[in-house]
Amino acid sequence: MIAYSEVSAFTETPGHGNRAGVVLRAGELSRTDLQALAAQIGAPETVYVMRREGQILRVRYFTPTQEVDFCGHATVALGLTLAQAGEWDGTSVLYLDTLAGRVPLRLDSVAGVPQRVWMQQPAPSYRPLPRSIRTELAEALGIDARMVHRGLPMAAASTGLWSVFLPLLDSVILDGLEPDLPRIQALTEALGVVSLYAYAPMGVNRFAARDFAPAVGIPEDPVTGSAAGALMALLASQGRLPVRGERACGVVYQGHALGTPGEVEVELELQGERVAAVHVGGQATVEREGTWAPRSVVGR
């Protein structure tokens, strides 16, 4: 039997944030088993620890329909699960080997109680988008192109997974979106990205967001850590975040439209105008635990 946990990330309130499946020992599972268990758990992503060598863990991420290179909220969920299981005390950095690269984790604790997991995401990358696509993206979300914010960046960006970022004028518009999921899927597949991420300003460095990823089996992701990091990196790279010294920070609020609000904290290290490192942090809470009988075991 394979033990697994269901963990809500980017929140400390059960039932809020974004749910992830976490499997700490998956080394004997075949790819078919990994996909089957992810589908059964039904969370936007499930993370599997395939093997561990000291402070380095080889991990894989699956949505209910396919494998993906990286997932921010599942990474936060994994870090907290390891800490609560007594398998990581936070005195040293933990490293995850993912398909998107090596991801360092650090743990914030208070009086020995794990509070927040921070991950350094893969280096940010950006791709410009033609202005002509603004109308298509807006219409796919059920709004007029006049509701798109012209002073904030519209672009594709990645800190592990590619998304298209579309700025809207305010959070009221964001909450009222009526997404055309088949159209969003066609657009994201044509653009070579995983999701369409709509965001709106709520303050100088605070933003509300919604993320649609039907191409990978996620109609709307409740709270998206990887995209929050990419968003803040994109904003900083275009001078849209306040900078103190060589650092910038921000917060993304997501999940309210689904009734599962969560909060993603982002810290950036800058070298001039270049974003040198992206750190994404959040809380998490274990919702439930279970066991599952694999259909096949490698080597048998």
Image (tube, rainbow, N blue to C red):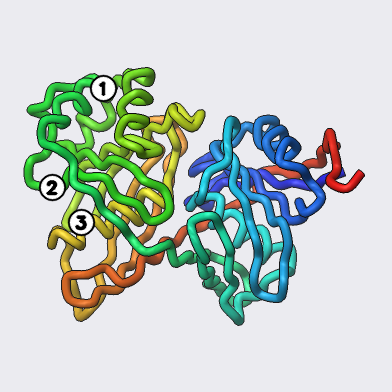
| Residue 63 image position (x, y, % from top left) | 57, 37
Q: Are marks 2 and 3 in contact (CB under 8 Å)?
A: yes
| Residue 40 image position (x, y, % from top left) | 70, 30
Q: Quadrant of residue 208?
A: top left
- Disc 3 residue type? Leu
Q: Is residue 226 left or right of residue 69?
A: left
Residue at mark 3: 235
Residue at mark 2: 152
Element type where label 1 sits in the image = helix
Alpha carbon distance from label 2 to label 3: 8 Å
Who comes first in sequence, dot 3 or dot 1? 1
Residue at 57% from the left image edge and 76% from the top image edge: 93
Residue at 58% from the left image edge and 30% from the top image edge: 65
Residue at mark 1: 140
Q: Quadrant of residue 44?
A: top right
- Disc 2 residue type? Leu
Residue at 24% from the left image edge and 49% from the top image edge: 127
